[in-house]
Each structure stands twice: as structure tokens, then as C-alpha cells.
Amino acid sequence: MLGKLEQTKARLGGIHKALDAFLNARQHLLVEYIRLSTNKNLPAKEELHEFCGQLIDYVSAGHFEIYDHVLAAYEASKGNARVLAERIYPRIKRNTDEALNFHDRYHQADDDLMMEMELDQDLNRLGELLEERFSLEDRLVSAIRLADHLDTGEPA
């Protein structure tokens, strides 16, 4: 996932300050996810709490900072934002719901036995969700870039 992130940053970096900040937040979340998921020991509750906060911040930033900008840019370039939204947003919504479920389950987790038994499996599932989410987000931003090039006549 880090390799894909570097490719995304190389391809989409510098388009917009909000997007650059979002990609940096993605990198921080991903580094912390990898650290937690590869650690052989059960993380401290504070570490898990911090990660859950980063997860919510990232998911929220997508919805409140990036997606609205993407739709506005797509509409401004005479694209059909509705088609884009109908294809991608329902998948992002389901993904968000699952990320929120992870947060709710582990943000205030007090049961070490439950954490020990299920955290590894839940982190694996969350990794799959994050990979899907990053791909969907990249598709949204790439659609805007393509629409911008179609409007200006520049090659994509």
C-alpha cells in the first residue's frame, strides 16, 4: 500500500493544497496501521486510541474536505458529478461505515482478552478496507484531472 501511495502522490501531488494535505494524512494513517498490524505484541490502549482517532480524522477529512471539492470541480468542468457519485460514493459510504465500526469497537476497548482474540483479524479486514478506500478516492481525483484536461484540450 505504501508503494501505491507513493505513485498516487507522484501522479496527483501538487494539484491542490487540500489534496496534498489529505495524501499526507493518508500516509500517516497508513504508517501507523502498518506499525500496529505488524507488531507481535498487543498495542497499548493509548496506541489503539490514537490510531482510532487518526482513522476518524482521515475518514472525516475525505467527506468534509475532499469529496465536496471533487464534486464541485467535476460539475464546474461540465462533468456529470451525479454519475460519478452514483458509482463511487455508495462504496465509500459502506467503507466509511465499516471504518466507524472498527473505531467504535476499539476506541474505548477495555477487554484485553477480546482485543487479543479479535484485533489481528479486525486489523486485517481494516487493511483491506483502507486499500479499497484509497483506490476509490484516487478514482475520484483522477476523474477530476481527466475532466480538467478534456476541458482545456490538454493531454491527460
Image (spheres, helix red, strand yellow):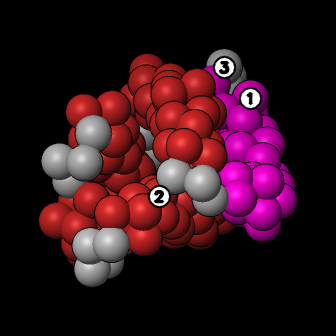
Going by the numbered disc 3, the residue's amino acid type is Gln
Quadrant in the picture for the C terminus: bottom left
Residue 145 in sight from this viewpoint = no
Disc 1: CA contacts within 10 A as few (<14), some (14-19) or many (>=20): few
Q: Residue at x 43, y 24 (%)?
A: 50
User: Outermost residue, bottom direction?
Assistant: 155
Q: Residues within 10 Å of mark 2 (few under 14, many from 20)?
A: many
Q: Earlier in the sequence, mark 2 or mark 1?
A: 1
Judged left or right of residue 149, residue 100 is: right
Kindly state the secondary structure of the residue where label 3 is placed: loop
Residue located at (71% from left, 59% from top): 80
The numbered disc on residue 104 is: 1
Magenta segment main secondary structure: helix
Residue position for label 3? 108
Which residue, given by chain and number where applicable, does mark 2 sit on? Answer: 144
Q: Find residue 16 and report its horizontal and vertical position in percent.
A: 27, 39
Q: Amino acid at mark 2?
A: Ile
Give the amino acid at mark 1: Asp
Q: Position of residue 6 (x, y in %)?
A: 20, 66
